Amino acid sequence: MLLKLAGLDYKTDTSGFRKAPKGKLPYIDDAGTRVADSTFIRFHLEKVRRIDFDKGLNDEHRGVAWAIEKLLEDHLYWLVVRDRWINEDNFNKGPVRFFDAAPALIRPLIIRMVRRRVRANLQGQGLGRHTDAESALLAGRDARALAGALGDKPFLMGETPCGADATLFAFVTAALCPLFQSSARDAIGSYSNLVAYRDRLLGVYYPGLPVGA
Ligand SMILES: N[C@@H](CCC(=O)N[C@@H](CS)C(=O)NCC(=O)O)C(=O)O
């Protein structure tokens, strides 16, 4: 999404984590320079390609945009991980497919190991310690904050997209994924401005991408 906002051509590599410098996605390979993590990808593009994703924003708006981005990446993110990886039905509808390429004989073992690690991460970060009802409360507050911040503007900070729109769009779209039962989906889906934002940005940046209902 950042590359789209920057108007830069790119090719998508779906081969997975093998070349990811930090063992996580996303990363980019910019003419041989590998940069991992969406925030550092953004910093790289700002420095090397001289792009200011927050052009036209004053310090107050830059601060709010950054805070919203981190709310999404470091709070709502974990609620979505929890919904998808801990809930058995959700896991079997989505994340289980990440392991399709593993040899069938050892696949269940790998799945158990990776799920154990995801559970440990959720415990370590802390959000995995809450009950379902408490998590749903937090998801509700996240959604209220996001819907309130967006209001009736076309983009988070006004008439044109800023850096945090890349994150907001990604998270709203992921949370609304109709495949999963989730408190994040219920919460985000109850705000018509967030659903309309998803639809609008999909139409502009990913025309034809099927996202379901
Ligand atoms: N805040 C980081 C998050 C990166 C991240 O957690 N990526 C997930 C996929 S959405 C991942 O690669 N997880 C693999 C793992 O935790 O081992 C970013 O925006 O780049």
Image: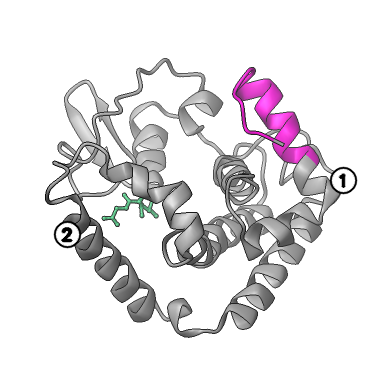
User: Mark 2: which amino acid?
Assistant: Leu
Disc 1 + disc 2, Cβ < 8 Å: no
Q: Residue at x 38, y 18 (%)?
A: 10
Which residue is farthest front?
105
Of 118 and 61, nearer the camera is 118
Residue 55 image position (x, y, % from top left): 61, 37
Element at badge 2? helix
**Magenta highlight on residue 208:** yes
User: Mark 1: which amino acid?
Assistant: Asp
Say whether residue 40 is visible.
no
Q: Is residue 23 left or right of residue 67?
A: left
- Which disc is residue 152 wearing? 1
Residue 213 image position (x, y, % from top left): 72, 37
Residue 9 image position (x, y, % from top left): 42, 15
Of 37 and 192, nearer the camera is 192
Task: Tell me: is circle 2 under 8 Å from ligand 1.
Answer: no
Which residue is farthest top?
9
**Magenta highlight on residue 138:** no
Element at badge 1? loop
Say whether residue 32 is visible.
yes
Tag count: 2
Residue position marked by numbered label 2 in the rendering: 109
Q: Residue at x 55, y 46 (%)?
A: 167
Q: Residue at x 76, y 47 (%)?
A: 194
The part of the chain drawn in magenta is 196-212
Q: Report the Cα–Cα distance between label 1 and label 2.
A: 48 Å
Of 48 and 10, nearer the camera is 10
Name which of mark 1 and mark 2 comes first in the sequence. 2
In the image, residue 128 above or below residue 151: below
